[in-house]
Image (cartoon, coloured by chain):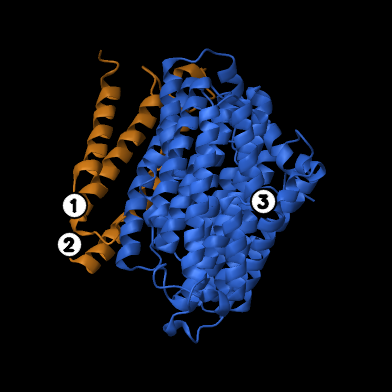
């Protein structure tokens, strides 16, 4: 059970994020929901790389280290890219929120009803 | 000519154009020049690629100097760019539309301020789409999907009015969630196969059974890319986002973005990577049929011209998905050909709606009328595009719909074939409604002194209209084998259907 706990917590975090996106009416809360879901995915990426008892993926000239004893370094590189992309999306969403507030004078999504049909 | 060293230019050229546009924005005429030059450059390259590529041939480019590692480890390290028949076909479609849209925007975008922002975002979106097409690496695919998507969120909000911002927010949140699901799917695949390279992944997956995990990945990818392709349960953003963007961008979004990020990736992933499992075939057929119906029926009651066209896009993507879902070589040919045709006529119609908006300053069909006399070229090209969309012979759209319906009958999906025929008739109805209210009837008094659009806009309209008119010639055997045939071959060979 203990081995699965991080994955379950990760799933719970993701669901919290999606719940916030679906059910909240405040734009800022929706954006926070997106961010939470995004970090759950990033966390999952790191969990995939984890190996019990693994060490940092650096080879040494003085001692023999097998690649099997290391954690997987590739997801660590991927998660950096993923975080940067997340930053871009978040920055864009927040810029939109500022402009929307300027137009409507509210953050309430249910009062923005220009688009119908 | 096109060798492995020139492939990265498909991404590098628009990317360089985007950044140079920002740097040199103060010099007059620079944004237009760079926008047109970069897109014509990639278009010419894509044409050469198609001419050069033989059936079944692949051009592979290893990015970065990872060659030495590859020999030692015995597996692919680093990102590979792969150009095969399907990629070459999609590159031509995307870059042709991008080039024509760039030419059209030179005149059209004078309505807005800050043209340089438009062109740099436009080129970024083009770079992202070309990247999605040529990459052979799952994570790289995700990155390029995001580049294209984020640029398109910003372009939808370009007008910065109430509607544009609201549509863009909706699009950005739904697109963001879709991207997360795609990333999650990529991670699951990586942890299962231990590689990100698509060719490697195909080999590893083919050698194993399908555990429950893979079905979860199917669901994630279908939802994620289905959201990007606007299949019906996931389509809510499209009818808001596409009409809110400036007309050239609507043409790009409806014409190529939903196909490059949605349909192309679904075809690539489910045919080549997973070997086209039976369950996915059923799901694609069902979603395709539902999309066809919902899009067409809702389009009937729209009065906003661009919104009508956006709903029609949903319906036509349904046709493409139906073809892909049936999965016989004939059906795939129909789907690929319909993808080509839909790119052409839907871009043409959105550019026409932009021309009307440019001249008459309205998108509401009830306010238009009698524009045929004042705008003969817009009128003529709209009618050609609309007839192609409606599937009237001999226009290109007729042949692709015919192939899909014949393929459905051959695969003994009689109900789907009948449904497709019925929805084609509904398509004719809403197309006639748009033409009738926009161009025929009495000329309204307030439109007494409007004139035809500027010359560069006309050039784009005429070229696209000619493609719609003569597109059916692509089915002539010699042309078909080199262009459509290569693309179909890529999809059907690996899946073994």
State the residue at coordinates (50%, 50%): B427
Side (left or right) of B74 relative to B288: right
**Numbered disc 1: secondary structure:** loop
Q: What is the number of the mark on residue A26?
A: 1
Chain given the colour orange:
A
The picture places residue B107, in percent across and down from the top left corner, at 56, 76
For disc 1, the chain is A
**Numbered disc 3: secondary structure:** loop
Q: CA distance from mark 3 to mark 1?
A: 51 Å
Q: Nearer the viewer, mark 2 or mark 3?
A: 3
Compare residues B106 and B370 and report the one nearer the observer.
Answer: B370
Residue under numbered circle 3: B393
Q: CA distance from mark 2 to mark 1?
A: 9 Å
Q: Is residue A70 above or below residue A45?
A: above
Compare residues A39 and B262 and report the one nearer the observer.
Answer: B262
Side (left or right) of B221 relative to B269: left
State the residue at coordinates (68%, 35%): B488
Q: What is the number of the mark on residue A106?
A: 2
Q: Residues within 10 Å of mark 3 (few under 14, many from 20)?
A: some
For disc 2, the chain is A
Side (left or right) of B309 relative to B71: left
State the residue at coordinates (67%, 30%): B329
* Tag 2 and tag 1 share a subunit: yes
Q: Residues within 10 Å of mark 2 (few under 14, many from 20)?
A: some
Query: Toward which corner of the image does residue B63 lie, by quadrant?
Result: top right
> Disc 3 vs disc 1: Cβ atoms closer than 8 Å?
no
Q: Is residue A47 above or below residue B395?
A: above
Chain B image colour:
blue
């Amino acid at each position: 059970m203990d081995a699965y706990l991080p994955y379950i917590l990760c799933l719970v975090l993701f669901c919290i994020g999606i719940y916030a996106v679906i059910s909240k009416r405040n734009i800022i809360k929706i954006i926070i929901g997106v961010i939470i879901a995004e970090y759950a995915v990033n966390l999952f990426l790191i969990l995939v790389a984890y190996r019990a008892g693994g060490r940092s993926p650096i080879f040494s000239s003085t001692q023999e280290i097998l690649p099997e004893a290391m954690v997987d370094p590739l997801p660590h590189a991927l998660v950096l890219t993923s975080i940067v992309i997340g930053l871009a999306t978040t920055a864009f969403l927040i810029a939109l929120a500022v402009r929307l507030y300027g137009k409507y004078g509210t953050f309430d999504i249910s009062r923005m009803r220009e688009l119908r049909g | 000519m096109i060798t492995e060293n020139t492939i990265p230019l498909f991404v590098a050229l628009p990317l360089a154009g985007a950044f140079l546009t920002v740097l040199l924005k103060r010099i007059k005429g620079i944004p237009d020049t760079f926008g047109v030059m970069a897109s014509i450059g990639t278009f010419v390259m894509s044409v050469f690629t198609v001419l050069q590529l033989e059936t079944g041939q692949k051009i592979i480019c290893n990015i970065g100097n990872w060659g030495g590692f590859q020999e030692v480890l015995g597996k692919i390290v680093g990102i590979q760019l792969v150009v095969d028949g399907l990629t070459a076909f999609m590159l031509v479609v995307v870059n042709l539309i991008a080039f024509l849209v760039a030419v059209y925007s030179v005149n059209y975008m004078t309505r807005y301020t800050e043209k340089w922002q438009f062109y740099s975002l436009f080129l970024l979106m083009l770079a992202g789409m070309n990247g999605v097409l040529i990459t052979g690496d799952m994570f790289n695919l995700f990155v390029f999907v995001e580049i294209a998507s984020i640029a398109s969120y910003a372009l939808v909000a370009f007008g910065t009015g109430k509607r544009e911002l609201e549509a863009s927010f909706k699009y950005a949140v739904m697109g963001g969630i879709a991207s997360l699901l795609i990333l999650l799917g990529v991670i699951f695949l990586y942890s299962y196969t231990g590689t990100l390279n698509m060719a490697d992944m195909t080999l590893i997956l083919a050698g194993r059974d399908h555990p429950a995990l893979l079905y979860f990945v199917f669901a994630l990818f279908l939802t994620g890319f289905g959201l990007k392709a606007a299949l019906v349960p996931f389509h809510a953003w499209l009818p808001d986002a596409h009409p809110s963007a400036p007309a050239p961008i609507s043409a790009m979004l409806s014409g190529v973005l939903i196909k490059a990020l949605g349909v192309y990736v679904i075809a690539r992933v489910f045919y080549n990577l997973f070997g086209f499992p039976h369950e996915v075939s059923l799901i694609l057929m069902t979603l395709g049929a539902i999309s066809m119906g919902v899009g067409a029926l809702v389009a009937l009651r729209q009065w906003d011209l661009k919104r009508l066209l956006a709903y029609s896009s949903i319906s036509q993507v349904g046709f493409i998905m139906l073809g892909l879902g049936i999965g016989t070589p004939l059906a795939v040919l129909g789907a690929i050909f319909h993808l080509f045709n839909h790119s052409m006529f839907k871009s043409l119609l959105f550019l026409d709606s932009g021309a009307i908006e440019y001249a008459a300053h309205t998108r509401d069909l009830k306010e238009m009328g009698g524009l045929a006399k004042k705008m003969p070229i817009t009128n003529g090209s709209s009618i050609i595009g609309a007839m192609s969309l409606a599937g009237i012979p001999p226009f290109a759209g007729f042949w692709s719909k015919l192939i899909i319906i014949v393929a459905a009958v051959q695969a003994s999906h009689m109900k789907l074939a009948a449904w497709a025929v019925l929805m084609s008739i509904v398509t004719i109805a809403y197309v006639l409604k748009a033409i009738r209210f926009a161009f025929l009837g009495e000329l309204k008094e307030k439109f007494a002194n409007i004139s035809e659009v500027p010359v560069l806009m006309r050039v784009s309209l005429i070229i696209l209209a000619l493609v719609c008119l003569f597109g059916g010639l692509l089915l002539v055997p010699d042309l078909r084998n080199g262009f459509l045939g290569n693309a179909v071959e890529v999809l059907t060979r690996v899946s073994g259907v």
